[in-house]
Structure formats: structure tokens, C-alpha cells
Image (spheres, rainbow, N blue to C red):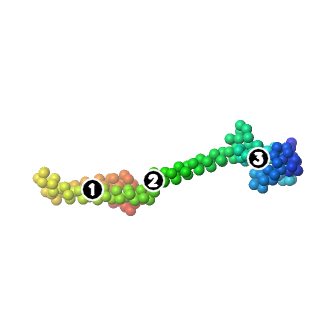
Amino acid sequence: MPELTASTREAARRLGVSDTAIHKAERAGRIAREPDGQWDIDKTRRRLTETADPVRSPLASGAGAEGTPFARLKVAQLALKVEAQRLSLDETKRRLVDVTEANAALDEIGSTMRDALLNWPARVSGLIAAELGVDPHLLQTILQSHINDLLTEAADRFDPAGLGGDRSPDA
């Protein structure tokens, strides 16, 4: 049978805390009276222990204090605070890059490389044709065809059809 009392002062005495502590915990929603208005001492002690600040409350002291939900919440809050500080420091030291800026830089690099490859056959086909003794126009056409195939293969590898970009699947 649960140990019940209607008096807040009696409940506080049995729990070893002040009646002010009981009132504050009740207002904060950490503990609640039974539907009939009485205090269940065991249930109240358990709720106070689960929600107590291990640094401030005599109920939370002891070996099990680190395992209380409140203690775990405090550890989680501290971990989040440390992570936020680390991210802020990384951002300040320019270790982090904005995704939009990074994508724009990659697009610029890719476009520059593509343009260089597309212009390469026109620049070198005359020199290569002279060395080989073949028609410069034919050599340029063959080189352009192979460069286009290479770029199409690379585009398919880095941006498969249906995942984005403005290319059509049959291009």
C-alpha cells in the first residue's frame, strides 16, 4: 500500500526537503498530487530524484545521480554547447565552407575545364596533322568527337540522368 499524506509539510518532512521545495517542484510540473489531492511519498520521491539537479538537490546526490534524466539532459546540453562552439570556431577560422559557395566554385572549375577541353582540338589539330601528314580538318573532327564522348561520359558519371542539372537524358 502506498504511503500517502494530505499535508505538503508532512510530505516534505518524509522526503527530507523543505515544503518550499515541494511547492516549487509542483509549480514547475516536476511532481503532482494524486487525483484525491494527497501526496504519494514513494512516487513523489522517485519523480523528484529523476528530475533533480545533481548539483543542487540532496535527493539527487549519491552514485545514481549521473543516471537521472536531468543529469543526462545536462550532459546532452553541454555536449550541444561544446559542438556549437566548435562549429563557431571552425567557421571563424574559415575551416567551413558555405555549400552554395562551394557548389558555385565547383561549377566554375568544371566549366573552365570543359571549355579548355572543347577548345583543345582546334588549337592542336594543325600541329598534330603537320607531324602526321594528315588532313587537319579531319583530325580536328575526330579529336572533337572523342572529346565530346569523354565529356558526356564524365557528365553521366558525375550527374546521372534524373538527379539534377539541365541536361536531358538523351543528350
Picture quadrant of residue 139:
bottom left
- Residue at the (42%, 58%) spot, across then down: 101
Going by the numbered disc 2, the residue's amino acid type is Arg
Residue drawn at the location 33% of the way across and 53% of the way down: 154
The image shows residue 17 at horizontal and vertical percentages of 81, 46
Tell which circle, 3 or 2, labels the residue nearer the N-terminal end.
3
**Pointers 3 and 2 in contact (C-beta within 8 Å):** no
The alpha-carbon separation of the residues under discs 1 and 3 comes to 71 Å
Tag on residue 117?
A: 1
Question: In what element is the residue under mark 3?
Answer: helix
Q: Secondary structure at mark 1?
A: helix
* Mark 2 vs 1, N-terminal side: 2
Q: Are marks 2 and 1 in contact (CB under 8 Å)?
A: no
Residue 72 placement: quadrant: top right
User: What amino acid does circle 1 point to?
Assistant: Leu
Vertical comparison of 88 with 67: above or below: below
Badge number at residue 34:
none
Side of 72 relative to 28 (left or right): left
Q: To which residue does mark 2 refer?
A: 94
At 79% from the left edge and 50% from the top edge, which residue is drawn?
21
Label 2 crowd bin: few (<14), some (14–19), many (20+), radius 10 Å: few
Which amino acid, mark 3?
Leu
Q: Is residue 150 visible?
A: yes
Q: Which mark is residue 48?
A: 3
Please tell me which residue is depicted at 86% across the width and 53% down the height of the picture. 36
Assign the C terminus to one quadrant of the image: bottom left
